[in-house]
Image (cartoon, rainbow, N blue to C red):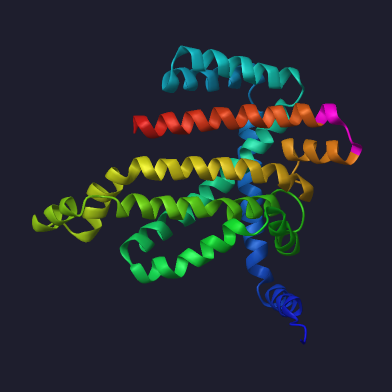
Amino acid sequence: MPRITFGEWVNTGVEWLRAHLAWLFDFFKTVFAGAYDGLDAVLQAPEPLLLIGILSVIAWRLRGLSAGVLSFLGFVFVDALGLWSDSMSTLALLLVATVIALAVGVPVGIWAARSDRVSAAVRPVLDFMQTLPAMVYLIPAIIFFGTGAPAGIVATLIFAVAPAVRMTELGIRQVDPELVEAAEAFGTTRRNTLLRVQLPLALPTVMAGVNQVIMLGLSMAAIAGMVGTGGLGGAVNEAIGQLDVGLGAEAGLSIVILAVYLDRMTGALGREL
């Protein structure tokens, strides 16, 4: 059976994109790098204990005293490991990627919830994005955006955007049709029905999607250290290169602490909203 040169077709398409859309990739690279650098500078500016105190107060407000105390102890432990700066760099990359993923995923999810054709077209794309091995995303990210934070942001948001689309669509479709019909019977426009009925009732499911975006983004941020993003992912990559089990354990535990904090806070925020 003759071999299908699918890889050559992909390479041809990539070369065409690089030749004709380089200006667009440079624009996004500048925007992503600027957003990351600005947020990283904000997170790195305060003294670690001051920012740890702020994060602990947020945890106390959302989850109670025990959560605040555990958050304080966990982040102090990360600072004592000498990985606080790397943790804030990872958090900055994660926040930028999450905001972009939600800015793309939530509108697409709303569109898919309101159109069966769009839903049918989007579903296989999301399946492809979620099943493709995570490290494969690093290849086009490096080709189009080079190494550094922009490539890590792009790889992270592509890997993490699917839950935002799926959970937004699911939440809106689960809203009781009778409530929507009642709103329309009182003369409410489709836009106001979406904003005042469907989205508020779908908010718990949407927030669950936000939680999943953050968790997937954080797992991908560690892998993104391979393209020079720095942060905790860079520390993990360094530990792999040097076969340093201790450094790997420290960086891995720091990622776990950050992940648990973000998971609990987003879950509590969703319930409160």
| Quadrant location of the N terminus in the rendered image | bottom right
Q: Please name the residue shown 77% across and 23% down the image.
A: 82
Outermost right residue: 242
Residue segment shown in magenta: 242-247
Q: Quadrant of residue 90?
A: top right
Task: Identify the residue shown where x is 89% and y is 36%.
Answer: 243
Question: Outermost residue toward the bottom?
Answer: 2
Q: What residue is at 58 percent from the left and 63 percent from the top?
A: 128
- With respect to residue 60, does 209 lie above or below? below
Dominant SS of magenta comes to helix
Residue located farthest toward the front when viewing the structure as drawn = 1
* Residue 78 image offset from top left, x and y in percent: 70, 22
> Where does the C terminus fall, quadrant-wise?
top left
- Residue 38 visible within the image: no
54 relative position to 7: left or right:
left
- Between 206 and 19, the one lying in front of the other is 206
Residue at 74% from the left image edge and 17% from the top image edge = 80
Q: Is residue 12 above or below residue 238?
A: below
Residue 160 point in image, percent of width and height: 56, 50
Number of marks: 0
Is 246 in the magenta?
A: yes
**Is 86 contained in the magenta span?**
no
Give the side of residue 273 with respect to residue 259, left or right.
left
**255 displayed left or right of 67:** right
In which quadrant of the rendered view does residue 248 lie? top right
Above or below, comparing residue 247 to residue 178 in the picture: above
Tell me if I can see residue 72 in this picture: yes
Picture quadrant where residue 70 is located: top right
Residue 178, image x, y percentages: 15, 53
Q: Position of residue 54 (x, y in %)?
A: 53, 20
